[in-house]
Image: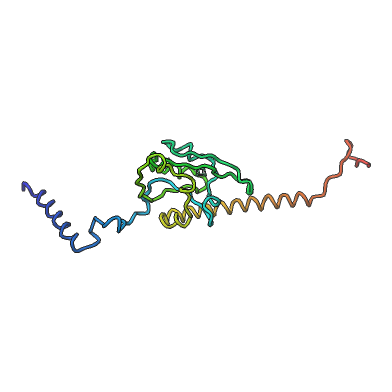
Amino acid sequence: MLGTGILKGLYVTAKNLAGSYHDPERLTTIQYPEETAHIPENYRNYPFLVFDGAEAVAGLRCTACKMCEKECPPQCIYIVGERDPATKKMRPKVFDLDISVCMGCGICVEVCPFESIKMDQHFEVAATERFEELLLHREQLAKPDSYYHKIHPTEAAVSDGVLAAEKRKAEERAAKAAAAAAAKAATPPVPPTTASGEPVSA
Ligand code: SF4
Ligand code: SF4
C-alpha cells in the first residue's frame, strides 16, 4: 500500500524517541565537559611515544631509527637522533610531531620496529596558536606503558608479547655467543709447524 514505508519509518522513530526517555543506554547525548563519552578501544587520533620505567625521556623505547619519519605520508614527524653516552644506544634528541597535519593513518605505528610509537585517544586539543601549540615535542609525546595499557588493553597485550619474544631471542643469541667464546677460549692453541708438519723449534 502506498505510504506504508513512511509509516513504518515514523513508528521506528517514535519508538526510539520514547525509549530514550526511560532507557539510559539509549541516550545519545551526554553533558560534556562534565561527562565524557566512553571511547572505543580502537579509536585513534595522533601518535604518542611509549616509555618504560619512571623517567619519561630516559625510558623512551624509541631508537631514533627514523622509519616513522620516512614513511609518514604528510611528513609531519621530525626526528634528530643522538647517542646516549652511558648506554651507547641511539635515542631521540628531538622528536616533533605536528598534530595539525597528522591524519591519524597509523602508518608510523605499523613501521616502527621497536613498539615505540602508538596511537593516542586524547582529543581535547583545541588551541589558539596553530604553530606553537599544535607542534608537540618529545616531552609532550612521551607517555608511560601503563597509559598505553589503559587506552588500548588488547593491542598493548600483543605488543608485550612481541617485546617478550624479542627479548627472549636476544638472550638466546647472547647465550650462544658467550658459549662460543668460552669454547674458543678453552681450546688449546695449535703449535706452529713447518711445511713438512714438523713442530717449529723455539
Ligand atoms: S598517524 Fe600517519 S600522518 Fe600521523 S604521524 Fe603517523 S604516519 Fe604520520
Ligand atoms: S620508527 Fe619507532 S623507533 Fe624508529 S624513530 Fe620512529 S618511533 Fe622511534
Q: Quadrant of residue 31?
A: bottom left
Observer able to see residue 105: no
Quadrant holding the C terminus: top right
- Residue in front for this viewpoint, 6 or 61: 61
Q: Position of residue 129 (x, y in %)?
A: 37, 41
Q: Residue visible at 53% across and 46% down?
A: 62
Q: Is residue 161 above or below residue 137?
A: below
Which residue ends up furthest to the front in the rendered image? 128
Q: How is the image coloured?
A: rainbow
Observer able to see residue 118: yes
Q: Residue visible at 77% across and 50% down?
A: 185
Horizontal side, residue 135 vs residue 168: left or right: left
Q: Position of residue 103 (x, y in %)?
A: 38, 41
Q: Is residue 74 above or below residue 166?
A: above
- Residue in front for this viewpoint, 191 or 136: 136
How many badges with numbers are in the image? Answer: 0
Q: Position of residue 186 (x, y in %)?
A: 78, 52
Which residue ends up furthest to the right in the rendered image? 201
Q: Position of residue 53 (x, y in %)?
A: 54, 56
Q: Residue visible at 48% across and 55% down?
A: 145
Q: Residue visible at 30% across and 55% down?
A: 33
Horizontal side, residue 153 vs residue 65: left or right: left
Which residue ends up furthest to the bottom in the rendered image? 22
Q: Quadrant of residue 198?
A: top right
